[in-house]
Amino acid sequence: MGLITCIIGGAGFIGKAVVEELLLRNDRQVIVVGRAPAASHLPATVRYVQNPTGATDELLEGLLAGVDEVIDLAYATVPQTSFHNPVNDILVNLPEAVRLFEHASRWSLRKFVWVSSGGTVYGHAHNVPLTEEHTTNPVSPYGITKLAIEKYAHLYHHTAQLPIVCVRPSNAYGEGQRVYAGQGFVATAIASLLDRRTLSLFGEEGTIRDYLHVRDVARGIVAALVDGQAGQVYNIGSGVGHSNRQVLDILAPLAVARDLPLNIQILPERAFDVKVNVLDSSKLHAHTGWTPTVRFEEGLQQTWEWYVKNHKS
């Protein structure tokens, strides 16, 4: 084995896909850091390190001393919770990220990838798809904190030569995503259908988002790790938008085939919702060759089948 890659938050939804993508390369050892006591779902070749309450200085020093690369996916909040407690959103995310950058800058890492958010850092779109040069005016505490961490990443790149890359993924979906968690419309829509719950749309069509299968998100993150340029920011998206209503239109025949009702509640649009968010990933493609491989309809069908198979009534 060659390089050793540490994935902080690697036991989560996107993290597991990143682990699988890295292992496919057969040129890296993988260490995963997570909050749970164990992560039995990870491959046996992966070393797992528990860190339940935020990495201690001793743990960080021990980990970083023996690795070549870091991917940081850890984040303690979601957009919905950030509105309920914006101060907490700052306190549980920003200090930990900056402390990690501080420690990482003391070691000779090949690359550090920090995972930001393409769905929240831009705010309201002036034009779509959004490039990395689009203005960043987040309209959620979550997006503001993500953007602040990006700024600290650039600070450490310029002042301490930390070889950091920031990636801004669009809306990941796929098999195994948590449902009813305030993040992930596809997973919650499918679960609502299977559970015969009423699903809320804010406005007749809902919002328009760039949905990208988690395998393509993981491939984009790994592409940025392998070939991305330090100091750069990269969007990871499909460049195609689907409204909440369009997602449900694709799912409707699948639900009807199982005699499941489509119960939709139309609520007023929310002032804090960004109406349209679709990302341009030309820069990532130009620098790394990455391009999406999973068509949305195909990925949605696979995701539906997984949830049907694993549904507990």
Image: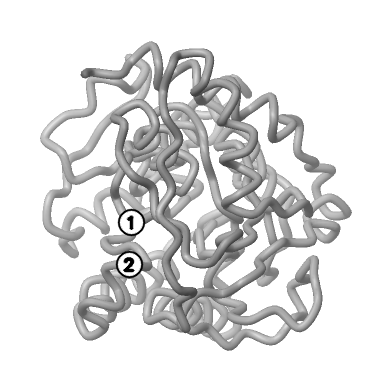
Categorize mark 2 by other alpha carbons within 10 Å: few (<14), some (14-19), many (20+). some
The reply, left or right, for residue 97 in relation to residue 136 is left
Residue identifier under label 2? 80
Q: Earlier in the sequence, mark 2 or mark 1?
A: 2
The reply, left or right, for residue 254 in relation to residue 306 is right
| Disc marking residue 19 | none
Residue identifier under label 1? 182
Where's residue 278, x and y in %? 71, 62
Q: Residue at x 26, y 68 (%)?
A: 81
From this view, report whether residue 78 is shown above or below residue 15: below
* Amino acid type indicated by mark 1: Gly
Do the numbered discs 2 and 1 sit on residues whose CB atoms are within 8 Å? yes
Q: Residue at x 40, y 79 (%)?
A: 145
Q: Residue at x 45, y 77 (%)?
A: 270
Given residues 62 and 256, the one toward you in this image is 256
Given residues 292 and 227, the one toward you in this image is 292
SS category of the residue bearing label 2 = helix
Q: Residue at x 49, y 84 (%)?
A: 139
From this view, report whether residue 238 is shown above or below residue 193: below
SS category of the residue bearing label 1 = loop
**Residue 164 falls in image quadrant:** bottom right
* Amino acid type indicated by mark 2: Gln
